Image (cartoon, rainbow, N blue to C red):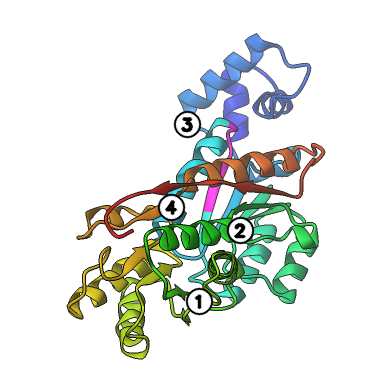
């Protein structure tokens, strides 16, 4: 394996000059840098990136923690942030927390050991332990999907309360009067609590009182199916259901069909996310489009500003949404 000495000998310069040229330090002539680069290529010398990073105090590494890699929302978000970081010559290290709060904490600590320049966290929920670790992190952290602004943690969130309100209005306008909500675990404030709260506010505004039910499960299609199947037994009068995600809604549609009812006619159904599964389901799912790729891009822009020490003018960025009209509402 070629050494620094071999490069210096081939380029006709000292080892210190080779080192300075590799690190692009001031005072090295461009002609000398060209000779060094040519010598490196000819002898196959491999630059010690760790030593170079230690010298420059920069690793160009960004840690990204996601709850699961199978999520369409997450994959679109990672695509978005990757585009921004590529343009900034940063490299993304991706970690899958498997929706575990403990793993989120573990990865934040691990990324700090790896000397990443910043961390983007798609958090499942916030608690005291996670907030404490984020505040202790040497690398700046930006939250996506959960609002950490109460703790002075920069956040990029979706307008979950307002989407719940909009869903309630759409269901009422479509003629539904007995409306319920199928959500996820209560710890997920954004996806479960905020969307339910918006729905409840819309129904109260319309004079319908509280939602018929607030059922909780997981993010998977099977969960939506199992919940809706039981809800049809417990609440046979239901004629409108707002689901926290499109995948939950697709499962609910299957249960409604199996019960001999027609989604969109007997029971209005709404989801959130504009997942492609909703487009191909029969009947096709009415939903709300979230710009998940924009969330990734925005979080990357916010983090780069933090890495560069730029002043932050806002504690959180709230992204809007668009209604998608199809067959179920």
Residue holding disc 3? 44
Task: State the CA–CA distance, disc 1 to disc 2.
Answer: 32 Å
* Residue situated in front as seen by the camera: 47 or 126: 126
Task: State the CA–CA distance, disc 4 to disc 1.
Answer: 20 Å
Give the answer, above or below, for where 226 lies relative to 172. Answer: below
Along the polypeptide, which appears first: circle 4 or circle 3?
3
Task: State the CA–CA distance, disc 3 to disc 1.
Answer: 68 Å
- Dot 2 lies on which element? strand
Mark 4 or mark 3: which is in front?
4
Q: Tell how many labels.
A: 4
Mark 3 or mark 1: which is in front?
1
Q: Outermost residue toward the front?
A: 207
Along the polypeptide, which appears first: circle 4 or circle 2?
2
Give the answer, above or below, for where 141 lies relative to 257. Answer: above
* Residue situated in front as seen by the camera: 52 or 42: 52
Q: Is residue 11 left or right of residue 322?
A: right
Residue at point 31% right, 73% down? 252
Q: Is residue 91 magenta?
A: yes
Along the polypeptide, which appears first: circle 4 or circle 1?
1
Residue at point 30% right, 77% down? 225
CA neighbours of label 4 inside 10 A, class few (<14), some (14 to 19), many (20+): many
Give the answer, above or below, for where 2 lies relative to 248. Answer: above
Mark 3 or mark 2: which is in front?
2
Mark sitting on residue 121: 2
Pointers 1 and 2 in contact (C-beta within 8 Å) = no
Residue holding disc 4? 288
Residue holding disc 1? 211
Segment tinted magenta in the rendering? 88-93
Pointers 4 and 2 in contact (C-beta within 8 Å) = no
Along the polypeptide, which appears first: circle 3 or circle 1?
3
């Amino acid at each position: 394996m070629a050494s620094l000495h071999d490069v210096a000998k081939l380029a006709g310069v000292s080892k210190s000059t080779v080192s300075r040229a590799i690190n692009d330090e001031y005072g090295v002539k461009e002609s000398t840098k060209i000779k060094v680069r040519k010598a490196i290529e000819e002898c196959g010398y491999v630059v010690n990136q760790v030593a170079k990073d230690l010298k420059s105090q920069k690793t160009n590494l960004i840690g990204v923690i996601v709850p699961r890699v199978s999520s369409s929302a997450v994959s679109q978000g990672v695509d978005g942030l990757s585009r921004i970081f590529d343009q900034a010559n940063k490299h993304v290290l991706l970690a899958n927390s498997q929706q575990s709060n403990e793993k989120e904490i573990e990865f934040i600590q691990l990324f700090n050991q790896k000397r990443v320049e910043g961390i983007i966290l798609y958090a499942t929920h916030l608690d005291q332990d996670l907030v404490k670790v984020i505040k202790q992190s040497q690398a700046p952290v930006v939250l996506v999907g959960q609002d950490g602004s109460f703790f002075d943690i920069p956040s990029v969130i979706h307008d979950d309360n307002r989407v719940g309100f909009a869903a309630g209005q759409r269901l009422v306008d479509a003629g539904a009067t007995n409306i319920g909500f199928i959500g996820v675990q209560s710890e997920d404030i954004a996806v479960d609590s905020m969307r339910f709260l918006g729905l409840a506010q819309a129904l109260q505004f319309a004079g319908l009182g509280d939602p018929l039910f607030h059922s909780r499960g997981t993010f998977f299609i099977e969960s939506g199916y199992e919940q809706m199947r039981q809800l049809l037994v417990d609440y046979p009068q239901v004629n409108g259901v707002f689901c926290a995600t499109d995948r939950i809604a697709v499962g609910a549609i299957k249960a409604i069909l199996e019960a001999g009812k027609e989604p969109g006619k007997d029971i209005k159904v709404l989801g959130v996310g504009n997942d492609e599964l909703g487009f191909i389901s029969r009947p096709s799912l009415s939903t709300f489009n979230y710009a998940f790729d924009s969330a990734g891009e925005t979080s990357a822009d916010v983090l780069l500003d933090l890495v560069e020490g730029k002043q932050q003018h806002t504690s959180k960025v709230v992204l809007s949404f668009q209604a998608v009209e199809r067959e179920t509402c």
